[in-house]
Image (cartoon, grey):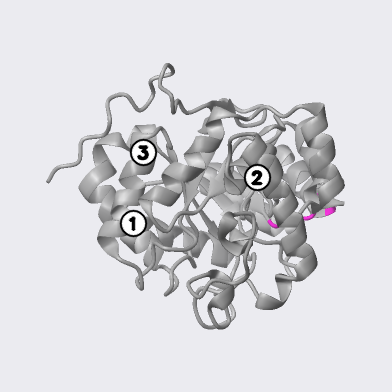
């Protein structure tokens, strides 16, 4: 059946109206909630399930889909699957979408298959475009800093991708505040200013608050946190231990069971009390807590099913925090 997008997806009077925030000093706006395809969209996943997640996201005003060359598993399969769905469902809506990809982590064998060389970044972008069936991506990121490649080379490759018409904007991810300052200066000098930074940021991972957010605010660069729910820790899932179907229960997963300590569970329980008082789930409050900062352009969520996506979108109904609430939350997180 042909997909027709929800005609009310941009209706500002809707109960679930999406907010669009300007990305730093640029002309681009992003939805307050963006959808990341890091997990649940790979070759090991169920096609119709993630197809419905993508459709539902767009129907609710999520215009930004975030990918990377190595997303899967296997690496590359998330982009391949997105490409199939893009051709079937989203081709008529291409100019309404912001599609991003990245390169930096291991993607293919040999000395040119990872990190930040010009050869790797430009080759990887070409491969990503082919997998997704796109002429260009809206945002292309350097996925991580490369300690063995001059930063001028890595940023110069990003600049070249824009000048070649393969990307409209560029960004960086996983760069420290010091590394970011240098990267931003180089890109500005080249004439392709950095649009956005994608750091790991949540209630439980707050390194970016020390210097990075101030830098981005001063320089007019957007911020889009990934892992805003700390790999599921900031949900109700772990309040009573480790469920058998959770990421912490998967061998060699991204969330080691050793991280789920009695002290952490106690913190989560206290945060959950505040969330319930606000009429939210713990996950909804954790997303709203990030969005309270206007330097945060968008929050990047994942979803394994449609209901999970819809639950996250409920955070938009209450993004305001009282000073008393913020003080209690801070006391718990210290």
Which span is picked out in magenta? Answer: 174-178
* Residue that badge 1 annotates: 50
Q: In this view, does 126 lie to the left or right of 154?
A: left
Helix, strand or loop for disc 3:
helix
Residue depicted at x 50% and y 59%: 68
Q: Name the residue under label 3.
A: 58
Q: Does the magenta stretch include residue 175?
A: yes
User: What residue is shown with label 2?
Assistant: 286
The answer to whether the residues at label 2 and label 1 have Cβ atoms under 8 Å apart is no
Which residue appears farthest toward the left when viewing the image?
1
Helix, strand or loop at label 1? It is helix
For label 1, the crowd category at 10 Å Cα-Cα, with few meaning under 14, some 14 to 19 and many 20 or more, is: many
Number of on-image labels: 3
Q: Distance between the residues labelled 1 and 3?
A: 12 Å
Judge left or right: residue 104 versus residue 258.
left
17 to 155, vertically: above or below: above
């Amino acid at each position: 059946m042909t997909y027709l997008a929800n005609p009310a997806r941009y209706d500002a009077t809707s109960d679930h109206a999406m907010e669009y925030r300007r990305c730093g000093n640029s002309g681009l706006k992003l939805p307050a909630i963006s959808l990341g395809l890091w997990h649940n969209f790979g070759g090991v996943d169920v096609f119709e399930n993630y197809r419905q997640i993508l459709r539902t996201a767009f129907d609710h005003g999520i215009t930004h889909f975030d990918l990377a060359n190595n997303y899967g598993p296997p690496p590359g399969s998330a982009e391949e699957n997105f490409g199939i769905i893009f051709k079937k469902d989203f081709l008529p809506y291409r100019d309404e979408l912001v599609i991003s990809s990245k390169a930096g982590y291991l993607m293919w064998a040999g000395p040119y298959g990872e990190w930040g060389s010009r050869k790797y970044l430009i080759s990887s972008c070409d491969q990503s475009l082919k997998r997704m069936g796109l002429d260009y991506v809206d945002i292309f990121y350097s996925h991580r800093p490369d300690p063995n490649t001059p930063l001028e080379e890595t940023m110069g490759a990003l600049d070249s991708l824009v000048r070649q018409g393969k990307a409209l904007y560029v960004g960086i991810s996983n760069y420290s505040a010091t590394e970011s300052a240098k990267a931003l200066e180089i890109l500005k000098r080249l004439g392709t200013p950095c649009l956005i930074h994608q750091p790991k940021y949540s209630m439980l991972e707050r390194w970016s608050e020390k210097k990075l957010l101030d830098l981005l605010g001063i320089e007019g660069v957007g911020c889009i946190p990934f892992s805003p729910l700390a790999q599921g820790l900031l949900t109700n899932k772990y309040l009573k231990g480790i469920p058998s179907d959770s990421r912490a229960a998967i061998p060699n997963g991204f969330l080691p069971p050793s991280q789920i300590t009695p002290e952490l569970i106690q913190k989560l329980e206290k945060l959950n009390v505040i969330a319930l008082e606000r009429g939210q789930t713990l996950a909804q409050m954790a997303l709203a807590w990030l969005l309270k900062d206007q330097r945060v352009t968008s929050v990047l969520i994942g979803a394994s099913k449609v209901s999970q996506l819809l639950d996250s979108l409920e955070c938009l109904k209450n993004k305001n925090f009282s000073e008393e609430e913020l003080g209690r939350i801070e006391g718990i997180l210290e």
